[in-house]
Amino acid sequence: MNLKSLSMVVLLAVASFSSTANAESCETPLADSMGAMKKNIRSFMGAYKSGDSDMQKQYVAELVKLAKAGADEMPLKADGLSGDAKQEMIDSYKAGMEKLVEQFVELEQLVAAGDSSGIGAQMKAIQDHNKASHRKYKKKC
Ligand code: HEM
């Protein structure tokens, strides 16, 4: 490799490193626990499809815990606001997370009752709430 192509490689490496660093500026403890929720939902769906109710119970209990912890955080998007607007976003985000906790508690009850079609409908409702909440509270990074 000659000097010119070596410096191109170095330049490309630096450019790709700085774009990763930018993406990381949106990495928050909340984004981490949301990521853990996503994994647990996937695992829950696996256990649901294979009819393993013990594993479903385990994953849903973890989801309740993660959603409760997330309700004590605040969205990064609120940092860009001030005064009443900021407080309103924090309060409404918290209400959204409390609704998610309730949805997971209901899911837990459906799992305990072995209500398979109820579980399917509840997962759909959780997904809808997830999408609507991300539109409102998730900063585009
Ligand atoms: C099952 C439900 C949910 C799942 C699986 C989920 C998953 C995720 C994931 C994976 C991320 C980070 C990665 C990305 O950029 O996409 C994220 C970010 C975020 N989610 Fe959720 N989410 C759920 C529900 C909610 C709800 C109900 C709210 C609000 C009431 C919410 C608010 C946020 C916010 C604000 C962020 C950005 C992180 C930050 O501001 O620090 N999410 N979510």
Image (tube, helix red, strand yellow):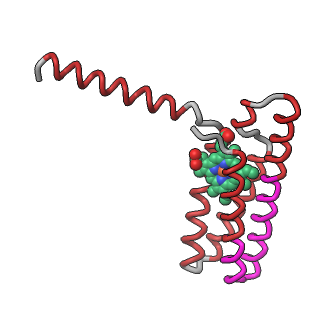
23 falls in the magenta region: no
Q: Quadrant of residue 11?
A: top left
In x, y percent, where is residue 79? 73, 30
120 falls in the magenta region: yes
Q: What residue sits 64% from the left and 40% below the top? A: 139
Among all residues in the image, which is located at the extreme left? 2
Q: Quadrant of residue 127?
A: bottom right
| Residue toward you, 47 or 24 | 24
Q: Quadrant of the C terminus?
A: top right
Residue 78 visible in this rendered orientation of the protein: yes
Residue 1 appears left or right of 20: left
In x, y percent, where is residue 118? 72, 80
Q: What residue sits 40% from the left and 28% below the top? A: 17
Residue 34 visible in this rendered orientation of the protein: no
In x, y percent, where is residue 28? 63, 36
Chief SS of the magenta region: helix
In x, y percent, where is residue 140? 60, 41
Among all residues in the image, which is located at the extreme top? 3
| Stretch of the chain drawn in magenta | 96-123
Residue 5 against residue 59 in the figure, above or below: above
Q: Quadrant of the N terminus?
A: top left
Number of marks in picture: 0
Residue 116 against residue 32 in the figure, above or below: below
Residue 122 appears left or right of 92: left
Residue 133 against residue 75 in the figure, above or below: below
